[in-house]
Every structure is written in structure tokens, then in C-alpha cells.
Image: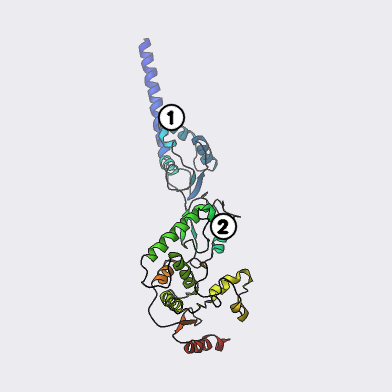
Amino acid sequence: MRWWKVALMAVLLMALIVAGSYGYWRYRMQAPIALEQSRVFEVMPGSGARQVIDRLAEQGIIDHRWPYRVVGVLEPQQLRHLRAGEFRLQPGMNAHQLLAKLSSNDIVTYELTIPEGWTLDRMRQRIDQTSRLAHDTRGMSDQALMEALGHGDQQGEGRFFPSTYRYHKGTSDLDIYRRAYARMQQEVQQAWSTRHEDLPIDTPYQALILASLIERETGVPEERARIAGVFVRRLERGMRLQTDPTVIYGLGEAYDGSLSRADLQKATAYNTYVIHGLPPTPIAMPGRDSLRAAVNPADGNSLYFVARGNGEHHFSATLKEHNAAVRRYILDRQ
């Protein structure tokens, strides 16, 4: 056999081998990965493609490493943009879909909910106990937290908007505070821009303080504007606000679950049975509805309210009517 025929056969054989190998590689890349159920896989920060492939194999997500290493030769762009983070992988994904997922922005996110009416202390406890966050603020004083946010000249109470915040593993808790602070700033300004004329409050911060009182007093959402009306009319007349939540806030850890006559007479900066006007800071984090109620109170003539015991309040225009309501809803039930 002539040499050129031998060479031709060798070339053809090599071509067949290459074509077969390529076809098998394509087959492996299209085959489903070795997952029977959904699971989360984490790409660690600083991991290279080889390390990611090794961890996928070690965790039983892929059967073989070699098809992915071939990707680095034939289609290297698929391995250049792997992202750090947690990714939820699904059964039935093929290798291309797997690599696309690990290169995407589709990182697993979690939710953190801060309810309306919580204090900053409760918010900080919740965040400190939340898993998967980077707890960069744990152990900071409230003042140090505000300084870290760039607002060291402000008190932190009431400055953070109660809502649900999404985050991914490794997010700094400072990012949650930063977003909540910015959101409250936005909500306060939006509410203030719609304020009723001739309110007895002069600044958005006073509106925030008033909204916090409304938030803590409201058991039924529909009553927010009516409670706001009572507070506004009392402020206009120079009457003390006389709202129990401010007394409780002022007592701090000394509050034992019930208010005594001595508590109502105890002089603190927050005891609105003693001081005139608003307390010096908010006493909680108000939601949007309380912010809007604070600057758009309901019309009326009521100056008092007392809890009925079912979440609602009885509103009164005179002290005589109020005292009768107190006897009916509180004293007669004791």
C-alpha cells in the first residue's frame, strides 16, 4: 500500500475519532445533570472554574468532570463569568443550562420582614438573629450604627421603614439598614408633600414622630386617621397627648407589662401625661398608612379615645363622655 493511502486512512480514522469524541461530548453536555430534586449550590467567592467543577462532582450534582473541562477548551466563554453566590439547581437541567445558571444574576434570595410598630431595638434583634447575613453591625451601639450609615447626627429610632427586604447570602446587614433608612426618608417626604394645611407640626421629622404614636395606638387600620385627628386637635389646643405607648417607651426595661398611676406620673422625656407636645423622637417605626394619617388627620371633634377591648376604640368629644367610656370598657371589666 502506498504511503499516501496509509496517511489518508490515518487522517480519516483520526477524523472519525475526533467526530465521535465531539459527538459524545455534545451528548454529555445535553444530558440531564445528576439531580433528583431541587437543591442549592454555592459558588464560593474567589473560586476558579476547576474548583467549581470539582465541588459539583463532589456533591453529586454532575457525574463526570471531563465534559466541563472540555468546555474550557472549546467554549471557554461559558466558564469565564461564573458568579459567587447561591444558586437553585433543578432536576432536568443539562450542562449548558447549569453553567448558564452559575453565570447568571439568578442568585437565591431570602426575605427579612420588619413589622410596622417595631422599635429599633426589636429590629436589631431580628437582624442579628437572621441567618445568611453578614453581621457587620452586631455589637455596635445605635449611635455607631447611625454613624456607619453616614447619619451620626440623628437618633435611630423610627428612621427605618418597616417592610420586607430581600437579600442573598453574605449580604451585609448594613445594607438592610441602609435600604430601610432610604425607604423611610422617601416615604416621609412623600407623605409630607401631601400634608393638610395648618397642621400643628412644622417638619417632616415631627410628622414621623406623630406617625409613630398613631402606629402604636392603632389596633384597627381604619382608625388611624381618627386617632391622628385626636392627637392633632389636642396639639392645637395645647392639651397633653396622654398616650400610653409613650409612657411605656419612656420606661424602657422598667416596664413590667402594666402601667400604674405612678408610671403615668413619672417624669420622662417621653411621658406625654407629663410633657406637652410631641416626645423628642419617634417611639417606633410607622408604616405608610400611619405616615399619611399623621399629615392628613380625619375631621371631627373628638379629643379622647379608649380601647374597647376588641382592637377598636371609643372616641369622645368631652371628658365626661370619655370618663363614662373608661368606666364601661375598662373599670367595669376589672
User: Residue 280 versus residue 11: which sits nearer the camera?
Assistant: 280
The x and y percentages for residue 21 are: 42, 29
Instruction: Indicate the quadrant containing the N terminus: top left, top right, bottom left or bottom right.
Output: top left
What colouring method underlies this structural image?
rainbow
The x and y percentages for residue 194 are: 35, 67
Q: Residue at x 59, y 78 (%)?
A: 264
Q: Residue at x 52, y 63 (%)?
A: 157
User: Residue 104 versus residue 126: which sits nearer the camera?
Assistant: 126
The x and y percentages for residue 327 are: 53, 88
Q: Is residue 160 above or below residue 334?
A: above
The x and y percentages for residue 22 are: 40, 30
Q: Are marks 2 and 1 in contact (CB under 8 Å)?
A: no
Secondary structure at numbered mark 1: helix
Position of 213 with respect to 96 (left or right) is right
The answer, for residue 129, to whether it is visible in the render is no
Q: CA distance from mark 2 to mark 1?
A: 54 Å
User: Residue 310 versus residue 38: which sits nearer the camera?
Assistant: 310
Q: Is residue 285 above or below residue 171?
A: below
The amino acid on which the numbered mark 2 sits, given as a three-letter code, is Gln
Sequence-first disc among 2 and 1: 1
Which numbered disc covers residue 143?
2
What residue does disc 1 label? 73
